[in-house]
Amino acid sequence: MVYFLLSASVPDYNEDFSVAGLGGPVDILRDASAIPHITASSAADVYFAIGFVHAQDRLGQLLRARRMAEASWPSDETLSVAPAVSDALESYAAGVNAWLELVSAGGRGRGSPELLIADERSIDAWTPGDSLRIARSFLNGLRPESARKGTPSLSSAIIPSDRPKVLELFATDPQQRLDAWAIDGDRTAAGTPILAADISGSLSLPSEWYLADLQFSTGPAIGATMPGVPFVIVGRNTRVAWAFRSFPVPDEEAPRGPSPVQAAGFLTMLELFTRSADATDAIGVAADMLPKGMEALAIDRETVARWPKEEAVRALSFRDIRLAELEARQSIFSTEGAIGVQRDTVSTVARTLLPLMAKELWFVQSRDSIEGTDANDLRRELLDRLASWNGDMDRYSPEPLLFWTWLRALQQRILKDEFPAAQQLW
């Protein structure tokens, strides 16, 4: 019975469906990675289909996202959004609800294997307001935790007045972080710009993101969508590619987080991006609708454009330093070369602190300092490994674990010395 219920909850991608709410036939072709390629005669049917496949593949994730969004934003006032966005949200909700009706009709488990053990006795119909709240929660998740919860940041609450307040040193990480970098056409093998997008966040299964190919009559929109929202957040059409960079906003500038108006503007911007004719057109849209704490980058076959035009001033991270090193090594980039930079796993933190680490292990005596003890043998082995290590965070090697264990102990030692009373900090 358990096997039957679990297997019934797994979708059959070869199955055909007849559902109400479509204006015409829709084709959903899955590739070898189960990424949906959706083709329909109207934009409404495309958005219906992406709602359908989001629910078909990620129903449990959709419901979790809705619960979390409702907890943060219990209600949203009625908003006047662009007609194209309103229609897209309505069609998306109809697609999600079409799958919910198929699940309720029986024979499909509970629509998702994880719902077999979840306390979901009834599932309410999806509404456009649910998508709006999820978009608002996503924007709020780009802020540090102290800003999301409306509490003073550690830097203002703990650091003594005579010490410098370095936000990047004490702010907690956001739930999601968007980053992007672009290479001008004069530095690429093909002579056209390359845009690379980095999306990082908490490790989750399934991923927080969902790749999709939406084939509209006006052209495709391909890239990363987020279950609960019908638009491509980071991606491209045939003419333009777009991505975002996020950075922390001081608590006093956005004490209550993104408003419903900002969330609606963000969705409107994404919808317009899918129809942008060139990078300048896309950035013109971003100039009017980009939420606070974000930068937009867009490229076409000739131009690299950003908004704001002046890159936001922020403290360099070790990742930024490593990226600058890798960019400086090559005068000309291919697409594969840009992907290689993205996949680089050499830690600048390790390369910077490794000499100090070796010195620490070399000079600090163990509790049992008798020559020939197991502790000294172990120390010698660790030093030999670290001396030949280049800082590559290879998941199959022990050196990264040795390094981070030492680094965590070093952080606690420094913080306990500087702030002995602030236990919540260390």
Image (cartoon, rainbow, N blue to C red):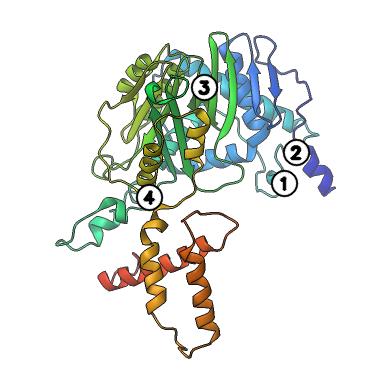
Asked if residue 420 is positioned above or below residue 115 in the image, the reply reads below
Local SS, label 3 = helix
Looking at the rendered structure, the kind of residue marked 4 is: Glu
Q: CA distance from mark 2 to mark 1?
A: 9 Å
Tell me the amino acid under the disc marked 1.
Answer: Leu
Residue 106, given in percent of the width and then of the height, sits at 78, 33
Number of marks in picture: 4
Task: Identify the residue under disc 2.
Answer: 9
| Residue occupied by mark 4 | 145
Q: Rounded to the nearest whole Å, what is the CA distance between mark 4 and mark 2?
A: 35 Å
| Earlier residue among tags 2 and 1 | 2
Tell me: 283 left or right of 59: left
Q: Residue at x 53, y 87 (%)?
A: 373
The earlier-in-sequence mark between 4 and 2 is 2
Across and down, in percent, residue 185 comes to 40, 21
In the rendered image, is residue 304 in sight? yes
